[in-house]
Image (tube, rainbow, N blue to C red):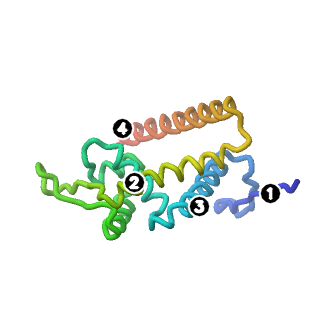
Amino acid sequence: MHMIKCVAYDIFSGRVIETKNHLGHSVKKLHFLMDQIMNRKLQELDLTCAQGHLIGFLRRRHEPPCARDIETAYGLSHATVSGILSRMESKGFICQSADPHDRRIKRIHLMDRGTDCSEHIRCSIEQCEGIMAQGFTAQELELFRGYLSRAISNLEHSVRENTATERSKQ
């Protein structure tokens, strides 16, 4: 068996450090690999992984969201969301229209082309997760989900605390 050595360059110390034991590196690599698989699976629909996520988000909403709702839900910048929406609109997956109560806000609507892709996206997600879960027992997967949930909760709590601390200093 070959051992893969993961390293990174520490810009503060100027040293090369081994990263194989860093959880953040592993989570980032997992995310990167899942994105690669999903991008390949969605390429035939002329979609990216991020655009596929957005279609799922729009399908789950009862009311058409605005860009700010997407920014908040995914923790993305306004510029990133604007770029994704612009590309999706030019491809006919979504359309944007003025909010009837506030003309400054644009509501995002899923077009037929976007709706028609939903089943393919769902199947692609299940296939990707199936690949990731190979070799895991049901119990191991449940534990893994619990560990991920706890790690996310810990980080969200830290972000909230830091935000509150920063606001109190202002």
Residue 153's spot in the image, x, y percent? 51, 34
Q: Determine whether the residue tagged by mark 3 lies in a helix, strand or loop.
A: helix
Residue 127's spot in the image, x, y percent? 59, 50
Which of the labelled discs sits on residue 129, or is there none? none
Q: Mark 3 sits on what residue?
A: 36
Which of the labelled discs sits on residue 4, or is there none? 1
Q: Amino acid at mark 1?
A: Ile
Towards the viewer: 153 or 10: 153
Residue at x-position 11% and y-position 49%: 101
Q: Are marks 2 and 4 in contact (CB under 8 Å)?
A: no
Residue at x-position 30% and y-position 55%: 110
Report, in whole angstroms, how far the alpha carbon at label 4 lies from the one at label 1: 45 Å
Residue at x-position 60% and y-position 46%: 129
Q: Mark 4 sits on what residue?
A: 168
Neighbours of disc 4 within 10 Å: few (<14), some (14-19), many (20+): few
Q: Mark 2 sits on what residue?
A: 54
Residue at x-position 26% and y-position 55%: 108
